[in-house]
Image (spheres, rainbow, N blue to C red):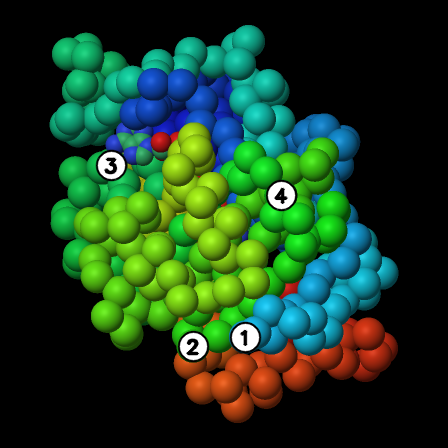
Amino acid sequence: MRVIIIGAGIAGLAAALRLRQIGWESLIIERAPQRRGGGYGVAFGGIGYDAAERMGILPALKDKAFITKELVYHKANGQRSFSLTRETIAATMGNRSMNILRGDVETVLYEAVRDTTEIRFATTIDAIDQDERAVHVTLSDGSIEHADLLIGADGLHSATRALAFGPEEDYRLDLDHMVAVYMLDKRPAAIAQGTTGTLSAGGRTVAVISVGDGRNVAFFGYRTDRSTGTPADGPHKTLPRVYGDMGWVVPEVLAGLQTADSIYFDTISQMVLDTWSRGRVVLLGDAAWCVTLFAGYGSSLAVGGADLLGAALENNPGDIPAALAQWEAGLRPEVERKQKLGRRVKGVYAPANPFVLWLSQLPLRLASLGPVRHYMARRYIKG
Ligand SMILES: Cc1cc2nc3c(=O)[nH]c(=O)nc-3n(C[C@H](O)[C@H](O)[C@H](O)COP(=O)(O)OP(=O)(O)OC[C@H]3O[C@@H](n4cnc5c(N)ncnc54)[C@H](O)[C@@H]3O)c2cc1C
């Protein structure tokens, strides 16, 4: 059996690994000229953790996981407000979950498939055709590839989805926020090594996140119901406009924009489709659902979803539609729960009203108390 996978992100690489484990051959098509790496710190747990264990990559992921020494919240004037210790952070996460750089999850998966899987970089998908026996994919390098299954794992702005399901606007639910993330060459002096500092004010959050090995990520998330311009203006123009009046470490972090290798800058949007497959074409990961960073579960769902897809294909040999139907029926309730969680968290994230901000931080201030910690673990982590 052969699969063509569009996208060498977490979802695409996890699918290649899982399908190889059931004897499938994969061809991965990646638009970027080379591996992307980097990214931001993600919480990796739930069905992703279980899947990683079954797929044999858990030890390699654990090697790259990090624990922030302290998470410090700052007031609008930059003064320290309150903080969570390493022990409290670890306790709210539970013991089958880890913090890890998004790019490190990708690296572990890439290392696991690179010797057995062809990855064609700087290539994209131009057309899809399918019949009862195969799916035929025209690629931007002019070649036509044939397979039993096509997996669209090409992220929020999936070209596979556009070709097989129609325009993105028909499925995109914008959560009225923008996010920007990039690696910092230099940690601002006011952020102690190994700690994460964050400040929320006026509908804007900024953070310097320590992601292990001395690496630090700049994070910006803000509401777009202010005069923030459009994503098309790009991060170099937009971020100084939105955050230019903030003190604390913000000027230093904004200066890091000039030397950042790659900047993630996008709307925070979910994808809402009432089915994730059309015949022999199936969507996986952000292309299919994009629960968003508000749910903090996209990487976990990408790996967990790939694992369950492999299991469904194994259980229904030779019957792709039956496998895809079984896979979706099993996974959809979890995805919908996380999408709902994402929409709920949106309401308390970076609130413009200082009183709402104070209220939304209250559980964090109290997090070191046992009962509150259990409540948070249930509400925010398990969803
Ligand atoms: C700031 C932030 C914080 C997050 N925090 C968490 C968290 O705490 N926990 C968590 O579990 N998740 C988190 N997530 C979500 C998580 O990163 C994603 O859900 C996860 O990486 C799954 O991605 P994916 O592989 O589906 O898509 P992507 O990572 O977008 O990968 C898609 C791949 O397809 C390629 N591609 C795109 N278009 C084409 C094309 N036309 N042709 C060929 N290739 C193409 C891209 O170059 C890319 O390599 C966060 C996301 C953000 C933005």
- Categorize mark 1 by other alpha carbons within 10 Å: few (<14), some (14-19), many (20+): some
Q: Give the residue type at disc 3.
A: Thr
Pick the quarter of the image with the N terminus.
Answer: top left
Mark sitting on residue 160 = 3
Left or right of 371 in this view: 250? left
Q: Are marks 2 and 1 in contact (CB under 8 Å)?
A: yes
Rendered position, 124 above or below 295:
above
Sooner in the amino-acid sequence: mark 4 or mark 3:
3
Rendered position, 375 above or below 198:
below
Q: Are marks 1 and 4 in contact (CB under 8 Å)?
A: no
Mark sitting on residue 187 = 4
Residue 300 position in % (x across, y down): 57, 48
Q: Tell me the CA gap for discs 2 and 1.
A: 9 Å
Mark 2 vs mark 1: give the one in front.
1
User: Which residue occupies 85% across, 60% down?
Assistant: 87
What residue is shown with label 1? 76
Residue 62 position in % (x across, y down): 75, 36
Mark 1 vs mark 3: give the one in front.
1
What residue is shown with label 2? 202
